[in-house]
Image: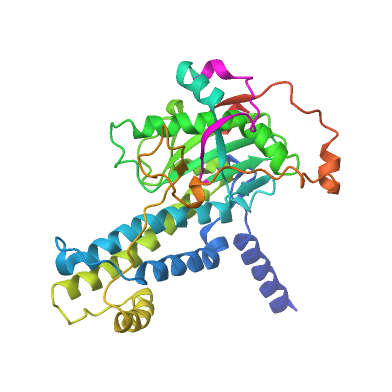
Amino acid sequence: MSFVGGSTSRRHFGDRLAVQPEPPVLRRHVHLVRYPDVEVDFDVLIDKAIAAIAEGEPVDDEILGHYVNVASLVRAVSFREGKLLEQAVERLAKVNPDLVVLMQSLKLPLVKAAIEAVAGNDWRHLEGVRLDCEAPAKGSYTPDLIVVNRGKRAAFVLDLKRSLASYGDTSRLEELKLKMLASAMILPDWLYKTQKRLMVETVGVAIVDGASRPSDHASGVWALSEIDDLLEIDGAAACMAELRLRFGRRVQQLLEMEARRALGLLETPAVTSTAASAIAVPMASTYARRFGALRAIPRVMTSEDVTDYTEEHGPGCSCGCCEDPTFDDDDDGRDDPEALERDAFSWPPEHIRVGFARRLLDA
């Protein structure tokens, strides 16, 4: 009996150590996520991204010659990393039940009055201004993600960049901010009309830098390492960092294989990691089928009319971003019990705050 009691007490002591929660003093938010919680889903996302990069047929280039495969691979990586970050944020947001993430078929109209208001005024003076999303518009803006916190009636318009280094001191970043702020002014009305009367009173704008360089919240730039505060989930930034680390290893292996082929080095160096061995088989069949890697198509994030914004799109362009924005007002969720329950709140809200995303929206 003493032996059984002793082993039981030791087992209980070990269980207490195994499930001991993180000290509250180290927690900033109620919800918590660790990489093992999302590792399976993240591995699937990484595998899909690597497969998409490895497939495809680059176009011959007289300047790049037999290095065209390496160049197209690099372009594909830049495109796929942005998509990977978006999908990862959507997965992490599921940890917080108050969050609703919108990332499909997003096209916010750039209302003329909103553009003029943002261009001619300090955005801090526009708090309380809400515009009709069906007013005359000049093109549209397609954000990467819209994150809505139903508990706080707050929304974030997010634009995820793998790195802001390419923007430098050019005016491209300022143009992006103008479009984001203009679209934020009509977002409350757009959410109410197109998302079954989903109501928000605060709208924040954030450009997330995947390279996590120093942030500038006053101008709407957030580092990826601060994603915890945007999602209100502890550990989200650490999960994103681990995701980029693992994705980077896989990408470097692909680049090394392509570079050796371009240099005529047929010998493949010994690979010790299981991830590299998993790549070798599909890559062999891929190169037997084609000679090259994916030729990436630059991601277009905005579409504008042919009068003012024709830098990237010409007349007659039929891409999804150049189509006229349409809104389905018939399916407004009036038969949805949850939507009917939300009708208890008055619309429009008494005050709408629009601006760059602030830490926890000054809650």
Residue 356 appears in view: no
- Horizontal arrangement in the rendering, residue 114 relative to residue 270 (left or right): right
Image location (x, y in percent) of residue 195: 70, 44
Q: Which residue corresponds to the image point at 33% horizontal and 80% vertical from the top-left?
A: 280
209 lies above or below 290: above
Q: Which residue corresponds to the image point at 34% horizontal and 75% vertical from the top-left?
A: 276
Q: Closest to the observer: 36 or 277? A: 277
Q: Which residue corresponds to the image point at 69% horizontal and 42% vertical from the top-left?
A: 194
Image location (x, y in percent) of residue 332: 77, 44
Q: Is residue 142 one of those drawn in magenta?
A: yes
* Quadrant location of the C terminus in the rendered image: top right
Q: In the picture, residue 63 is in which quadrant?
A: bottom left
Q: In the picture, residue 279 is in which quadrant?
A: bottom left
Image location (x, y in percent) of residue 124: 52, 18
- Horizontal arrangement in the rendering, residue 102 relative to residue 320 (left or right): right
The chosen color scheme is rainbow
Q: Is residue 28 one of those drawn in magenta?
A: no
Q: Closest to the observer: 320 or 198? A: 320
* Quadrant location of the N terminus in the rendered image: bottom right
- Horizontal arrangement in the rendering, residue 318 relative to residue 67 (left or right): right
Residue 35 appears in view: yes
131 lies above or below 97: above
- Horizontal arrangement in the rendering, residue 20 relative to residue 355 (left or right): right
Q: For the image shown, how many numbered marks are present on the structure?
A: 0
* Range drawn in magenta: 123-144
Q: In the picture, residue 190 is in which quadrant?
A: top right
Image location (x, y in percent) of residue 85: 46, 53
Q: Closest to the observer: 62 or 323? A: 323
70 lies above or below 128: below
